[in-house]
Image (cartoon, grey):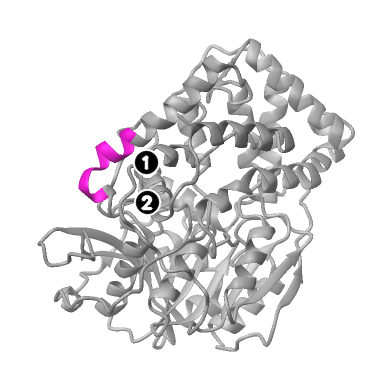
Amino acid sequence: MQRKKIAAALAVVTASSLLIAAPAQADTGLARQEIKWQRCFDPVPPGFPPGAERLECGQFTAPMDWHNPRNGKTITIAVSRLKPTTGTAKTTVFTNPGGPGGAGRTMPLIYLDRPKLSENAEIIGIDVRGTGASSNVTCGLYDTLGSTDPRDRSKTNLDLIYGGMELQAKFCQTKSGELGRHITTEQTVRDLDLLRQVLGRKKVDWLGYSGGSWMGAYYATYFPKTLDKIVLDSNTQFTGPWQEVFGDFGMGVERRFRVDFLPWVAKYDHIYHLGKTGEEVRQTYERTRAKLAEQPVTLPDGTYYPVSLDFVLFQGQYSKYAFETTAQKFAELAGAVPAQLKAQASYPDALLGTRYGILCNDTPFRGGREFLERDAARDGAKWPLLGYYQIMGPCAYWDRPNVNLKRPTGIGVAPTLMVQSVRDAATPIEGARKAHAGFAGSRMLTVQDEGDHGIYGFDNKCVNDIVERYLVDRVTPAGDLSCPGVPLPEPGQQQAGVLEQARELAVQLGW
């Protein structure tokens, strides 16, 4: 179903929170276990980057509940590592692609073309608890997001939307069972510090994107003496609750859509024929959306409804290199004639279950259905592309466990480098600035005239140089910095961004 594609598209988000004072990790004996490393794949799949054969995979055991670690209930965490080909690694870098709930074992592969990092560091990829090849949670393959058009504010449609959210919460919590109540940031960062001990490292570094900025800030807050260099790329407002983070989502997407994407499509009207100005292209979007409401269109890759068009365009805002395929699909739908073929995509939903576990367990949700209705109407009017959609809606119906997160302040934490583009759609700069202001000792590297989500490790030399000087040369910037963004590409110059690369490799492997 197309809404499965919608759920997959939303796997890239971020945020912040509140917790209890963290005692030292309980001595469960698990720190003395050994990871049995072996090659992740043999032979290397076609199209993988040179050096991919070096990636090793393994797993370790962690308590299901770190508050009761000796009850005998354990889970498995799957990990990968990429070691330098020559010499000894100067540091060990834990990586995270965000989500929350994104599987991360392919992450080390995207740094193979960053030799300054990959030849000086042991790079670790992690499928955090709940997702990937680790012990999974699930929503029983139920996903209500996108099942009906949220612009329709009739009572009957609102009953469907919010009834679906309530059912979503019940599905996720029932199907995930006992483990679901322990899918939290606090439990996850304890897994991470156990991994550090299992690897025999006194300290490690952190390189996290999007939701990985939230995870990194909390890891540093709970274990400030075991993290050395910390890079947070495309930042959530990790000093506040998740609800505030997602409250800005529609704003960030709309800004990127109007400032970058629509004028870019208009510039190439001779190719896409969607309008000669950004506003003309936006009006084409509205007309096409209305047509799809009257008559959905079936193409070889699936059936498209108004919400499908919204999420095609939303997905395209993450990376400038996605603009071309997004515009092509938009143009195809704008002039589409129904085809005879229909494909059904299939996606595992461990990421969905983990995402809702983190979002709904970590921090309290304020408000019920009346609040949700008012919030959607207000945000939708301001930011029509995505403002009506409420990703965290099921949290209003969640039976939340007693989780009290410690608030990240940065006090006692090593100086942290935050990388942030000014028009990031998924993690808007407004939230990143609040996090920066509230996280002592952090340095903000602002990427001007840029909207991509996930910057380091790709094609911005200025950003790459600063991050590697910090991670590899161990030189902390004296203060905030700025880099220019990379210009928008012309059609025909498409390539995958850093987070897209990791996901594409995982899909090819079936991970």
Classed neighbour count for the residue bearing mark 1: other residues with Cα under 10 Å, few (<14), some (14–19), many (≥20): many
Q: What residue is disc 1 on?
A: 398
Q: Quadrant of the N terminus?
A: top left
Q: Is residue 503 visible?
A: yes
Of 147 and 318, nearer the camera is: 147
Q: Which mark is residue 361?
A: 2
Give coordinates of residue 434: x percent, y percent: 64, 65
Looking at the picture, tell me which residue is in the foreground, 434 or 461: 434
Above or below, 26 against 64 in this view is: below
The disc, 2 or 1, on the residue closer to the chain's N-terminal end is: 2
**Residue 139 visible somewhere in the drawing:** no
- Of 348 and 432, which appears nearest the observer? 432
Q: Amino acid at mark 2?
A: Asn
Q: Which residues are magenta?
A: 170-179
Magenta part, dominant SS: helix
Labelled pair 2, 1 in contact (Cβ < 8 Å) = yes
Image point (47%, 83%), residue name: 120
Is the residue 141 above or below the residue 456 in the image? above
**Vertical placement of 69 versus 178: above or below?**
below
Q: What is the three-letter code of the residue carrying label 1?
A: Trp
